[in-house]
Image (cartoon, helix red, strand yellow):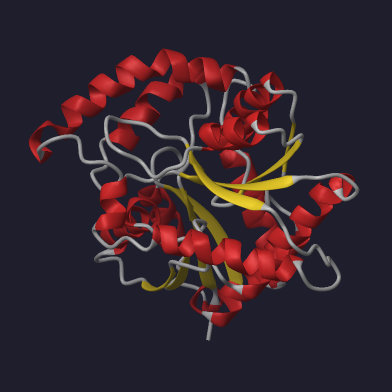
Amino acid sequence: MTDSAKDTTGVVLLNLGGPDSLQAVRPFLYNLFSDRDIIRLGPAFIQRYVAWLISRLRSKKTEEMYRAIGSRSPILDITRAQAAALEKALNGSRFRVFIGMRYWHPYIKDTVRAVTGEGIRHVIALSLYPHYSKATTGSTINEFRRQVKGTGLTVRYIDRWYDFPPYIEALAELIAKGTAAFRDNDFHIIYSAHGLPESLIRSGDPYLDHIKGTVREVNRRLSSAPYNIADVKWDLSFQSRVGPVKWLRPSTEETIERLAGSGCKNLFVVPVSFVSDHIETLYEIDILYRAIAGKYGAHLKRCEALNTSEKFINALKELVMLNAA
């Protein structure tokens, strides 16, 4: 082990992952539905069989969705770009930034192997889900803990940052930029978060409270300088429901139909629980939801994803620095 490796802190950006080809869609779905932290499909001993069945039944439809956005998920390329930008922002050889995905390549186990292979002994595991849920951050960090067991790595976990001021600032900036064209017209913001089974919320999962906290802080920030967007009209809704269970409501489709059907002509959708573009933004919002709004004569515009925006990368940098001491 080199002295530089001893002094280097590894930063691992943890994310969901996504299929990198149409052939990867079915096994990706199988990995996703096999995880009982996301959804419990009957008793544990039949989970994998039900996951196999669902992935088989859903794969063709899902492949068509991916085909409409380039035949692959962009999440790997974007997360790599975020890692590169963060490493540059951290400025110097003290940090090395890696990425680890929960349900597709590069898997967390492979990332841990890469970190230890470089002789790094100290790691900050940063979840790219701002809002904690057992189904997202919880599952991902549980897998990270399993993979680092016995490696000798010391790990600090950043598992929630839904109200972190630099993150709020990054979101507010993009919302202000995106709604600028609407300022002289009536418009309505729809904060669209990824759905979650109601049973998780009833069991104490903090996800819904965290989402509401982000919306509250963003609206507060928008009302002050330099944005000065007062009296924002907004709704919170949920997208991406899957599986035979009750999910959080109202759905984003229902919300769009209600608002557009009542005469609202300008809808601005903020994918509030996502930090990068993927199928939920590029297909669900940009294609599916825009078409629904169009049926009612409404104009739907989406807020840019955080991706590698300067203020978002700065927010990640600040999170790392706060936990690097």
- Say which quarter of the image contains residue 113: bottom left
Q: Nearer the viewer, residue 274 or 148?
A: 274
Left or right of 40 in this view: 237:
right
As drawn, 286 above or below 166:
above
In the image, farthest residue toward the bottom: 325
Residue at position x 60%, y 70% from top? Answer: 95
Seen at 67% across and 27% down, the residue is 293
How far across and down, in percent of the image, does residue 97 sit? 57, 61
Residue at the image position 38 percent from the left and 22 percent from the top: 26
Quadrant in which the N terminus appears: bottom left
Which residue is at a point 86% across and 70% down the rendered structure image?
226
Residue 217 image offset from top left, x and y in percent: 62, 69
- In front here: 224 or 264? 264
Q: Give the mark count.
A: 0
In the rendered image, residue 18, in percent from the top left (x then y), is placed at 49, 35
The residue closer to the viewer here, 90 or 75, is 75
- In screen coordinates, is 2 left or right of 141? right
Q: Position of residue 300 (x, y in %)?
A: 73, 33
Question: Left of 144 or right of it: where is 9?
Answer: right
Q: Is residue 127 visible?
A: no
